[in-house]
Each structure stands twice: as C-alpha cells, then as structure tokens.
Amino acid sequence: MKRHILVSEKKAAIAAIAQALDFPGWFGQNLDALYDSLTDLSWLPEGEYVLVVPADLDSSVADVLRDAAKRTAESGDRKIRVIRTER
C-alpha cells in the first residue's frame, strides 16, 4: 500500500501518517507513539507499506520513519518503506 504524506511540519506530518495507516484510536500523537505504531501495525494486513514524504519533512519525524523502516525490514510481516521526494 502506498500513501503520500504532503505536509512537512512535525504535528501535521504525524497526524497525516496516522491517518494514512489508519492508526488505532489509542495512538498518542507524538514521536514515541509514532515509532511504536509504525513498528507494530498489527491492525493492518501483512505486507509492505510505502510512505512517500516530502524532502523537507521535519527531521525528527524523518528520523523516526528511518528507524522504524530499518526495524521492520529486519523483522516482522508488516514492513515500512519511506521514499523522500520533492513535492
């Protein structure tokens, strides 16, 4: 599944990612919760989930995405892949 995240500011980007991946209602809307949710995804079918994000994405969100993608690539049946692009 491929989802485009069109915002670069931290709070808006976290919300857009949560919406794109249909995070559960208990999602905490912060970086720790973002990482935890991205490395779980148990509410979604198995497979690869691709997030296309702007090149100017907030660096703290980009770091979480990078770390989560690395973690899911190493283990798990739900993987995150991140593509950074110009809008």
Image: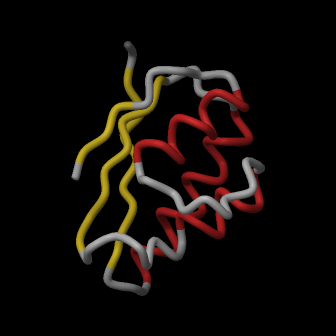
Q: How many marks?
A: 0
- Residue 84 placement: quadrant: top left
> Viewer-proximal residue, 66 or 49?
49
Judge left or right: residue 19 versus residue 64.
left
**Which residue does the image show at 22% across and 53% down from the upper left?**
1
**Which residue does the image show at 53% across and 47% down from the upper left?**
18
Judge left or right: residue 6 versus residue 64.
left
Q: Quarter holding the C terminus?
A: top left
> Viewer-proximal residue, 64 or 10?
10
* Rendered position, 54 above or below 42: above
The percent position of residue 3, horizontal first and vertical second, equals: 31, 40
* Rendered position, 28 above or below 7: below
The percent position of residue 50, horizontal first and vertical second, equals: 31, 50
**Which residue does the image show at 50% across and 68% down from the upper left?**
70
Q: Residue furthest front?
A: 25
- Residue 72 placement: quadrant: bottom left
Image color mode: secondary structure
The percent position of residue 55, horizontal first and vertical second, equals: 50, 24
**Which residue does the image show at 44% across and 32% down from the upper left?**
53
* Rendered position, 37 above or below 12: below
Judge left or right: residue 29 versus residue 37.
right
